[in-house]
Amino acid sequence: MFENCDLTDAIFQYTILEKADFRTAYNYSIDPELNRIKKAKFSRSGIAGLLDKYDIDIDLTN
């Protein structure tokens, strides 16, 4: 569990993150194509950290 962790500048590459809990973590960028994230938990706002590589804007206000 990454409880209330600021993961700025953390590098996740070819990492096994299965069942990891990122629900209260923030400032992370994880490439789902380079890491194993099966059954990992993310908050709604944290999903943006899984899409960083696509350089898209995500509106989480809706």
Image (cartoon, rainbow, N blue to C red):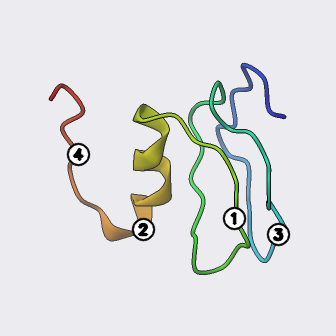
Secondary structure of residue under mark 2: helix
User: What residue is disc 4 on?
Assistant: 58
Amino acid type of the residue tagged 3 in the rendering: Thr
**Is 14 situated left or right of 46 in this image?**
right
Tell me the kind of residue under disc 2.
Lys
Q: Distance between the residues labelled 4 and 2?
A: 13 Å
Q: Mark 1 points at which residue?
A: 37
In three-dimensional space, the C-alpha distance between marks 4 and 3, rounded to whole angstroms, equals 25 Å
Residue 21: image location, x then y, percent: 74, 39
Position in image of residue 47 (x %, y %) = 44, 47
The quarter holding residue 31 reads bottom right
Q: Which of marks 3 and 1 is nearer the N terminus?
A: 3
Whether residue 15 sits left or right of residue 7 in the image: it is right
Q: Is mark 4 on a helix, strand or loop?
A: loop
Which circle's residue, 1 or 4, is located before the other in the chain?
1
Q: Nearer the viewer, residue 15 or 10?
A: 15
The image shows residue 35, relative to residue 29, as above or below, that is below
Query: Are the residues tagged 4 and 3 within 8 Å (C-beta)?
Result: no
Q: Mark 2 points at which residue?
A: 53
Residue drawn at 72 percent across, 19 percent down: 4
Residue beneath the point at 80% across and 61% down: 18
Query: Do residues under tags 4 and 2 come within 8 Å of each other at their CB atoms?
Result: no
